[in-house]
Amino acid sequence: MRPSVAVRVPATSANLGPGFDTLGLALSIYDELTVTVLDEDRLVIEVEGSGAAEVPRDGSHLVVRAIARTFESAGRRMPGLHLQARNVIPHGRGLGSSGAAVASGIRAAQGLLADEVTFGDDEVLRIATDLEGHPDNVAPALFGGLTIAWTTPAGPAHKKLLVHRGVSPLVFVPESTMSTEVARSLQPAQVPREDAVFNVSRSALLVAALTQSPELLLAATEDRLHQDYRAEAMPHTSALVRALRAEGFAAVVSGAGPSVLVLADGPGARLEAAELAASVVDAPWEALMLAVDVKGGTVREPAEGST
């Protein structure tokens, strides 16, 4: 077993408007983790950054659970570990912080076991989905880029796609948080057939817009399946999305919210969207001008470059 590994995992934005529980995009904000094997059978957990005051410091920590599950899948016993986590991805803001934690743990376990065990992508995604509950956030966190995720009788599956270089992501992050469980509870069990058909068409169009035709992003990000049902729980988010879309910007709720993702069709349009948002909101929002991450979760020895 390797003595120590360093991991970096990107933030993610899921749904992307119409692609509910299916589409996800990796973004260039990163959580970093260093894991060192201890001689003693104990856990030492150090956390700094977002959520540091709230996350547990024992075996219930999501990163530790992911490491343990990966070791179990390999038929190995998890050793004592020292975890040093630097959390940059905002917690509870719809940017995939829990998916990143799961991906971090899995990649760390892979790195520690790299000389003994080889994990395929399907196995990695299965472990991650078992822990996260659905694959739309963990797939881009693990593999990067734009991912389409779905489930089969044999388990979860994904397809990674390269995003058109003209797509310029912009994320507005508020001070407030939103629970994914609360957001999901606002979803109806059934939706009108015409709304379902509408979202099928827009989801297909969105894949084309993100990979080939960014000029179609506004139409491609229309949604009737989930955002309107959650609007009352996130009034400031909903108002910002409406204001941006009214001016032609492809704005959507990021994941379960309350952050807002804008998929601009170029750096100039992204700057215009940021200026517009600053003029219409009456609460503090942090504007993050990001890139699409293409690598996903990476692992290296602490003194080396990422692999």
Image: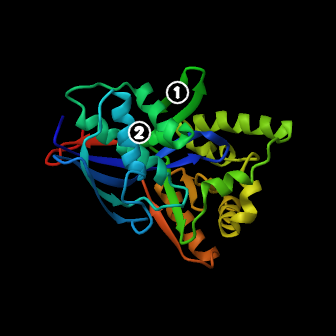
Residue most toward the front? 41
Where's residue 148, x and y in %?
Answer: 55, 33
Q: On the picture, is 262 further left or further right than 107? A: right
The residue at the point 60 percent across, 62 percent down is 178
Instruction: Give the position of the N terminus as an image quadrant.
Output: top left
Q: Amino acid at mark 2?
A: Leu
Location of mark 2 (residue): 142
Q: Amino acid at mark 1?
A: Ala
The residue at the point 26 percent across, 51 percent down is 42
Where's residue 140, x and y in %?
Answer: 46, 40
In depth, the one of 23 and 137 nearer the eye is 137
Residue most toward the top? 154
Determine whether 13 is above or below 125 in the image: below
Where's residue 149, x and y in %?
Answer: 55, 33
Where's residue 225, x and y in %?
Answer: 75, 45
User: How many circles with numbers are drawn on the protein?
Assistant: 2
The residue at the point 46 percent across, 56 percent down is 267
Location of mark 1 (residue): 157
In depth, the one of 15 and 252 nearer the eye is 15
Mark 2 or mark 1: whose residue is earlier in sequence? 2
SS of the residue at dot 2? helix
Q: Which mark is residue 131?
A: none
Q: CA distance from mark 2 to mark 1?
A: 12 Å
